Image (cartoon, rainbow, N blue to C red):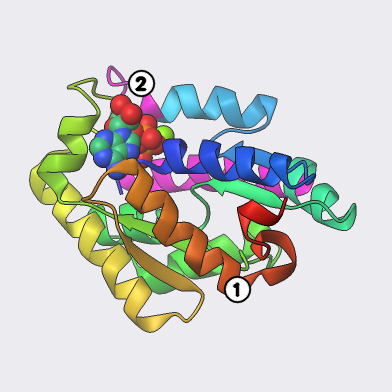
Amino acid sequence: MEGAGKTTLLERLARELRERGIEPVVTREPGGTPVGEALREMVLDPRRRLDPVTELLLMLAARAALVREVVRPALEAGRVVLSDRFDLSSVAYQGGGRGLSLDEIRRLNALATGGLRADLTIVLDVGVGEGLGRKGGEEDRIGGGGREFHERVAEAYRALARSEPDVVLVDASCGPDEVYESARSILRARFPETFGRAVGSL
Ligand SMILES: Nc1ncnc2c1ncn2[C@@H]1O[C@H](COP(=O)(O)OP(=O)(O)OP(=O)(O)O)[C@@H](O)[C@H]1O
Ligand SMILES: [Mg+2]
């Protein structure tokens, strides 16, 4: 969720993997490729007006490029990929938040990703006011969507976590160390070969 600490957590997890001798591919959405970063600027620019369908299609275009240029090649090379947002952000923001059809978004997501799904999606759950407050008032076009919009986005994420086994909710209302520990224990259980060994045994 907005301002929940995704980037902070991802940096810590990447650092931990490096300490374990695993160099992860770290990326973000929208973005992660030249065309994706250009689309990111376009969709986040607060001076721009975009209708929901256009917004969705720009996000999907960035995702399609990311999967084809970065994620798939990395996975095929045996790398671990950590992505700051992925397909479920479209379900939450353009579906829950903007009110577009969830089924349609899922179909278009499948087109964009070529059917590739994340092994695990961690949703950092924080109250809307707290998350927006952490961002320090710096508002991009989507972050500035208003409280009710972000409440619908948050609810959509919670619904995804209830209905999909590979989506887990982590309470992000606590401090960054606790969020990191919660995420690590989930990752250790799910991916013992990657996150399994206790740090003390390194
Ligand atoms: N668990 C936490 N508790 C309090 N502050 C936090 C926590 N995690 C991160 N922060 C701080 O909150 C701010 C936002 O964190 P971060 O950029 O990691 O969030 P984000 O989810 O990536 O935000 P965005 O939605 O803007 O991408 C940063 O200043 C960060 O230092
Ligand atoms: Mg971030």
The segment highlighted magenta reads 44-68
Amino acid type indicated by mark 2: Asp
Q: Quadrant of ligand 1?
A: top left
* Residue 65 at x, y percent in the picture: 69, 41
Crowdedness near tag 2: few (<14), some (14–19) or many (≥20) residues, C-alpha within 10 Å: some
Q: CA distance from mark 1 to mark 2?
A: 37 Å
Q: Nearer the viewer, residue 129 or 48?
A: 129
Foreground mark, 1 or 2?
1
**Residue 198's x, y, as percent?**
62, 60
Residue 74 located within the stretch drawn in magenta: no
Residue 162: image quadrant is: bottom left
Image side of residue 135 versus residue 193, left or right: left
Classify residue 160 as left or right of residue 138: right
At which x and y percent is residue 21? 80, 44
**Mark 1 element type:** helix
Q: Nearer the viewer, residue 20 or 60?
A: 20
Task: Label the magenta part by its dominant secondary structure.
Answer: helix
Task: Identify the residue position indicated by label 1 in the image.
Answer: 190
Q: Residue at x 69, y 50 (%)?
A: 81
Which residue ends up furthest to the front in the rendered image?
A: 200
**Displayed quadrant of residue 190:** bottom right
Q: Amino acid at mark 1?
A: Arg
Residue shown at 52%/52% (left/top)? 86
Say whether residue 87 is left or right of residue 52: right
The residue identified by callout 2 is 45
Q: Residue at x 74, y 53 (%)?
A: 80
Q: Residue at x 81, y 55 (%)?
A: 75
Corner quadrant of residue 107: bottom right
The secondary structure type at the circle numbered 2 is loop
